[in-house]
Image (cartoon, rainbow, N blue to C red):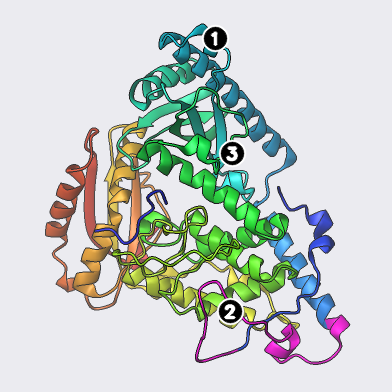
């Protein structure tokens, strides 16, 4: 069962923080009617009027700057901004990967007997997207990099065999394996120790510029569906950068929003929460409508806006074109329009349980940040980790293992892609389930393993036949898994048994 679809669907330098701290003059009017329109907000009163703080405007400005400075400090303390050395390492890796792809295209062109007059023009490139492409990666982030090749370079042979062998022969490359059965097929490997996901798109042209325009119809004409899906991440990133009024302040907001989502357990698309693209669009939406606001102001407005957002009204970035809204037959709890494609929404696995968890965290964020100008306010309360052991008495324990690390990675990836079905089944029986995104490992087990713990409502677990559920879920997973089957064990555990 699917709950959404996506079909043809710089770093902030804390030393320059004062550059990004103008006083905001737009707030949000408390309104029980919530007369939001898609992509439209009315101008509203100044911050001090909204929050009930009168007094010296200079004092309010100074306090607002202090709150923004505190957020930048938290970003530094949490390691959200990579060092210059780490950044240069990533850039060098991408540079070397581009060179490998150009040489690969020449090799493939020669093997396909491309006429000599075209051979010297044959070229490919690498385009980054995801957190790295948006400029919000940290020192531990992987790199999402799209390999763009030519019309004659097939994914089955030229990409997954020829390019894979070239990469495997390089001393910089390790832990390489192919994920052919994914919705977007890709290679996954480490390059100079940096994890890279590399999908493939082929364009119906002979030569591809290094900075190819992914919105130019000339390059997109007649491309296959897998290539279109692979390109959607790059196109979405570039469109967001084009639409936000200040890229650097957008990056700062998104870093803070992602940190909040991870700390509060609402980040992880496969588990029914937000993915990176969802949070990027929500952050860009706020930045677009408040172009002169500071970081702390935008963070406050983010929670104020989405705590009272009238879902399922879609969140839509404005790009100067009045696109018509086309309803979908999919169930979308929190529809967020894909910015590069006006007729599709970001792929979403949000279900009833995760929808209410996200809403409650939006409201908590609003209730905390509305007091941000009070002297005793502390951002760290907002970023406190979600208290799972205090919130739930019992959990579903999902234990996954395989004979070696590579097999485990493939097995866990497939099982996680089916988690939505398990969440829905638990909802049907218990009414609610909180799928904790954190992954654990049982160090006492003999095989490599990954363990998940999902919170359950109290006094309801006797309604679960966990053995039967395990058999049925394993059967549905094996029906779509093509590799060596790993092990899966479901059990009910008490809160004091959590790691």
Q: Nearer the viewer, residue 224 or 157?
A: 224
Residue 350, placed above or below residue 150: below
The reply to whether residue 137 is in sight is: no
Mark 3: secondary structure: loop
Label located before the other in sequence (1 or 2): 1
To which quarter of the image does residue 93 belong? Answer: top right
Q: Nearer the viewer, residue 60 or 23?
A: 23
The residue carrying pointer 2 sits among few (fewer than 14), some (14 to 19) or many (20 or more) residues within 10 Å by Cα, namely many
The residue carrying pointer 3 sits among few (fewer than 14), some (14 to 19) or many (20 or more) residues within 10 Å by Cα, namely some
Task: Give percent across and percent down for residue 440.
Answer: 40, 51
Marks 3, 2: nearer the viewer: 3
Marks 1, 2: nearer the viewer: 1
Residue 148 lies left or right of residue 452; in this view the side is: right
Contact (Cβ within 8 Å) of mark 3 with mark 2: no
Residue at 54% x, 61% y is: 281
33 drawn magenta: yes
Q: Nearer the viewer, residue 158 or 7?
A: 7
Residue 190, placed above or below residue 341: above
Q: Which residue is mark 1?
A: 117
Residue at 64% x, 53% y is: 242
Q: Nearer the viewer, residue 183 or 55?
A: 183
Residue at 22% x, 42% y is: 487
Measured Cα–Cα span from mark 1 to mark 2: 60 Å
Q: Quadrant of the C terminus?
A: bottom left
Q: Which residue is mark 3?
A: 213
Q: Which residue is mark 2?
A: 304
The reply to whether residue 247 is in sight is: yes
Mark 1: secondary structure: helix
Q: The magenta stretch spans which residues?
A: 30-59
165 drawn magenta: no
């Amino acid at each position: 069962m699917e709950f959404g679809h996506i079909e043809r669907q710089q770093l902030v330098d804390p030393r320059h923080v004062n550059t990004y701290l103008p006083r905001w003059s737009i707030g949000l009017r408390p309104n029980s009617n919530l007369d939001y329109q898609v992509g439209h907000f009315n101008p509203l009163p100044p911050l001090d009027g909204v929050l009930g703080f009168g007094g010296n405007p200079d004092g309010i400005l100074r306090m607002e700057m202090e709150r923004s400075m505190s957020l930048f400090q938290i970003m530094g303390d949490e390691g959200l901004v990579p060092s210059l050395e780490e950044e240069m390492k990533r850039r060098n890796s991408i540079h070397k990967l581009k060179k490998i792809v150009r040489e690969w295209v020449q090799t493939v062109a020669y093997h396909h007997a491309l006429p000599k007059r075209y051979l010297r023009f044959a070229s490919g490139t690498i385009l980054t997207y995801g957190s790295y492409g948006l400029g919000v990666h940290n020192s531990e982030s992987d790199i999402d990099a799209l390999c763009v090749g030519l019309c004659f370079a097939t994914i089955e042979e030229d990409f997954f065999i020829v390019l894979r062998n070239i990469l495997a022969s390089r001393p910089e490359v390790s832990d390489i394996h192919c994920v052919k059965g994914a919705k977007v097929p890709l290679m996954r490997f480490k390059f100079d120790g940096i994890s890279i996901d590399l999908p493939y798109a082929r364009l119906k042209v002979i030569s591809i510029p290094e900075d190819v325009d992914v919105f130019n119809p000339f390059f997109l004409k007649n491309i296959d569906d897998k290539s279109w899906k692979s390109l959607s991440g790059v196109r979405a990133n570039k469109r967001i950068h084009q639409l936000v009024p200040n890229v650097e302040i957008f990056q700062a907001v998104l870093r803070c929003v992602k940190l909040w989502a991870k700390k509060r357990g609402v980040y992880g698309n496969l588990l029914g929460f937000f993915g990176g693209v969802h949070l990027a669009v929500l952050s860009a939406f706020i930045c677009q409508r408040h172009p002169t606001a500071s970081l702390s102001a935008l963070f406050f407005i983010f929670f104020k806006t989405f705590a009272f957002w009238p879902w399922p009204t879609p969140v839509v970035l404005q790009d100067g074109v009045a696109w018509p809204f086309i309803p979908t037959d999919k169930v979308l709890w929190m529809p967020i329009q894909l910015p590069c494609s006006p007729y599709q929404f970001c792929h979403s696995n949000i279900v009833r349980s995760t929808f209410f968890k996200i809403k409650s965290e939006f409201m908590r964020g609003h209730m905390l940040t509305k007091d941000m100008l009070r002297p005793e306010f502390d951002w760290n309360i907002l970023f406190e980790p979600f208290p799972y052991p205090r919130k739930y008495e019992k959990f579903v324990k999902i234990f996954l293992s395989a004979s070696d690390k590579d097999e485990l990675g493939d097995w866990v990836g497939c099982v996680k892609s089916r988690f939505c079905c398990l969440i829905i089944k638990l909802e049907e029986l218990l009414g609610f389930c909180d799928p904790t995104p954190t992954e654990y490992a049982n160090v006492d087990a003999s095989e490599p393993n990954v363990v998940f713990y999902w919170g359950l409502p109290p006094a309801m677990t006797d309604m679960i036949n966990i053995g039967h559920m395990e058999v049925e879920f394993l059967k549905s997973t094996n029906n779509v898994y093509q590799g060596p089957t790993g092990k899966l064990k479901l059990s009910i555990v008490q809160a004091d048994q959590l790691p």
